[in-house]
Image (spheres, grey):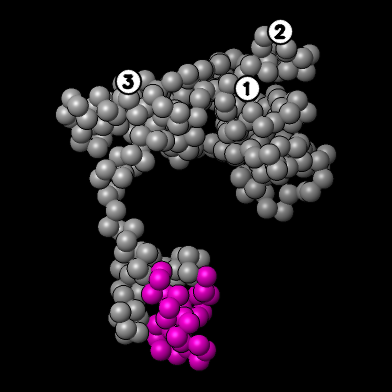
Amino acid sequence: MNISDIRAGLRTLVENEETTFKQIALESGLSTGTISSFINDKYNGDNERVLQMLQRWLEKYHAVAELPEPPRFVETQTVKQIWTSMRFASLTESIAVVCGNPGVGKTEAAREYRRTNNNVWMITITPSCASVLECLTELAFELGMNDAPRRQGPLSRALRRRLEGTQGLVIIDEADHLGTEALEELRLLQESTHIGLVLMGNHRVYSNMTGGNRTVEFARLFSRIAKPTAINKTKKADVKAIADAWHINGEKELELLQQIAQKPGALRILNHSLRLAA
């Protein structure tokens, strides 16, 4: 592609509202001003460098566009099971725990629930944000509190004021990274604001609160869990629903998909395999 083709291609994408200068800038590493000037043949800098960067961006854009479009979201039996727990926590202003092996669809179900319901906020805990302050800061950003206090006490009070009266639901993904102190802070936040709280993660997020190794601190949290939901493996009906969404009906193909779904990573690996096959 020559420079005229690049300019015309980018201009067409923007004019057809398939992308924006801001998105191109974000993905190409150039500024919006540079891109706009380049497209309009008014850029006074190194046009060759900008041309190469925008050509690479355009080639990748078209390559992605040629990939088969996966189903946006498949409402499986497991998804409905997870949503029931979330809805219960929201309606009863209580705590629910959703635990299970990786790749069974917990995170995607939570994201879709947030997308389709009002006043649902979701954060994902990583080892670097597992402390009380970092966890609360993540929640504040999710709530749009970009000017929230940076100290634990004032931040906790600001979050309580923000959540009071919302009748909302807070979803904590990868909650197994949280320690006793952070979980206790979330429990108190839920209790004082009368919101729903969902703790999601692997089986450790629930086993910490049960069994012989349960500490006094975890026991206090466990007594307030209204609805625990454990998802140990992918259901056959889940795989069938995903196969239907991909228009796969052959018996041999369905049998292979069921085998793939039993491997570690389950539905995540299954979806990757389907995209590769397509």
* Whether residue 275 is situated above or below residue 31 in the rendered picture: above
Find residue 38 and report its horizontal and vertical position in percent: 44, 84
Find residue 80 and report its horizontal and vertical position in percent: 40, 24
In the rendered image, which residue does mark 3 sit on? 236
User: How many marks on residues?
Assistant: 3
* Whether residue 107 is situated above or below residue 60 in the rendered picture: above
- Residue at disc 3, secondary structure: helix
Q: Is residue 169 left or right of residue 264?
A: right
Of marks 2 and 1, which one's residue comes earlier in the chain?
Answer: 1
Which mark, residue 141?
none
Of marks 3 and 1, which one's residue comes earlier in the chain?
Answer: 1
Highlighted magenta segment, given as a residue range? 29-57
Q: Mark 3: give few (<14), some (14-19) or many (20+) Cα within 10 Å.
A: some
Q: Residue at x 75, y 37 (%)?
A: 131
Kind of residue sitting beneath label 1: Arg
In the rendered image, which residue does mark 1 sit on? 204
- Residue at disc 1, secondary structure: helix
Judging depth in this view, the residue of 140 and 261 nearest the camera is 261
Judging depth in this view, the residue of 251 and 245 nearest the camera is 251
Find residue 144 and report its horizontal and vertical position in percent: 62, 49
Kind of residue sitting beneath label 2: Gly
